[in-house]
Amino acid sequence: MWCSRMALRRLQRIAIAPLNIIGGLTSQTQREMSTLPRVYVTRQIPPEGLKILKESGQVQFELWDSDDIPVPRKELLQKVKGVDGLLCVLTEKIDAELLDAAGPNLKVLSTMSVGFDHLTLEELKKRGIRVGYTPDVLTDAVAELTVALLLTTSRRLVEATHEAKTGGWGTWRTLWLCGHELANSTVGILGLGRIGVAIAERLAPFKVKKFIYTDIAPRPELASAINAEYVSLDELAKQSDFLAVCCALSPETKEICNKNLFSKMKNTSIFINTSRGGVVNQEDLYEALSTGQIAGAGLDVTVPEPLPTSHPLFTLKNCVILPHIASASYTTRNAMSSLAANNLLLGLRGQPMIKELKL
Ligand SMILES: O=C(O)C(=O)CO
C-alpha cells in the first residue's frame, strides 16, 4: 500500500513532464505512466493552463516548447500519432490529414481560441472527436482593443505620432490631421454576438447616435441590450459611419466585405476588423482606401498572418494594421489557456466540457 502511494506521487510528479523526458524512470512507474492518456500541446501555452495540465496527474503530455515559431507541420504530423487528446492554437490547421495522422485514439481536441475556422468540423464530427474552445473569457479584451483600434484609426493617431516624431509638426493648423468622431455617429456591427455587444457597450458613452447590425437573422435578445436596429447588409454599409466586423469566418462570410460593400459605404466611413482576415477581400479594401471610397481601416487580422511587410496595405496612411492582438492581455491569455486545459481534461474524462462546440 505504502509503496503504491509513493509510486502514485512519483507518477503525479512525472506526469507534468514532457514525454520526451520520460526516459530513466523505474519500469514500474513507466508502466503506470503509460496508462495515462497521451496529449500533444502544439504551443507553449500561458502558465495558468500549463499548470492545470501539469498538476492534473491525469495526462502525460508533450508540448512544442516555443511561443515564437509554430510547430512545423511535418513535426506536428509525427507528434500527434496515437495521441488521445490535442490542445492547439489557431495557427494549426486541424484537417483530415492531421486527424488521419493522429489515428483512432484521438477523442478530444481543445483549441485555445474562440474562432474555429482552423478546424475542419465535418472531419472531427465524422470521427466522433469532441471539440472544446474558449469563448467569453476574451470578450472584454477583444472589445477593448476594438475600441482602441477604432479611435486610433478614426483620429489618425499613428500618422499623428509619426508627424510629431519626424518633424512634420509645424504650427497648429486648422484642418491638419482631422479625423472623424464618434459623437452623433451611426455604428454598424457586422455579426452581432457577445463581442459585438461588448464593443457597443463601450462605444455608447462616446455619445453614439445609433447602433445598427446585420446577421443571418435578427438577434433581439442581444440587440435589445444595446438598443441596436437590425438592417440588411446593404443598409449597414450605407448608414454606418463606423463599421465593425465581428462575425466568424465561414463559407458564408468569406470575403463578405468586398467591392460591393465598400462601394456602398460613405467616403467618411471607418472600417474596423478584429474578427478574421478572411472576411475581407483585401484587394477591394486597398482599392476603397486608396481611392478615398472610405476614409480609413483598422485591421487586427489579415490574410495571410503575418501580412508580408511588402503588402500594399502597409503603404497606406489611412490603414492601421495590428498583428492579431485583440485578445492579448495577460489576464485573458491565461484565462484562455486555463479554459483550454480544463476543456481538454474534462473531455478526456468523458465529462461535459466547460465550453464545447456542438458538432
Ligand atoms: O481566439 C481567437 O479566435 C483569436 O482570434 C485570438 O484571440
Image (spheres, rainbow, N blue to C red):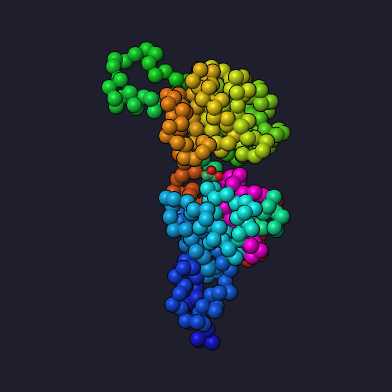
Q: Position of residue 203 (x, y in %)?
A: 52, 30
Question: For the point 54% across and 27% down, which residue is it?
Answer: 283
Q: Nearer the viewer, residue 259 or 248?
A: 259
| Image mark count | 0
Residue at the top extreme? 174
Q: Position of residue 226 (x, y in %)?
A: 61, 32
Question: For the point 68% across and 28% down, which residue is it?
Answer: 230
- Which SS type dominates the magenta stretch? loop
- In the picture, residue 240 is in which quadrant? top right
**Residue 225 horizontal side relative to residue 11, left or right:** right
Q: Position of residue 179 (x, y in %)?
A: 44, 20
Question: For the point 60% across and 65% down, which residue is it?
Answer: 82
Question: For the point 49% across and 73% down, which residue is it?
Answer: 12
| Magenta-colored span | 103-121
Residue 263, relative to residue 320: is it above or below? above
**Residue 109 horizontal side relative to residue 322, left or right:** right
Q: Nearer the viewer, residue 330 or 45?
A: 45
In terms of image quarters, where does ligand 1 lie? top right
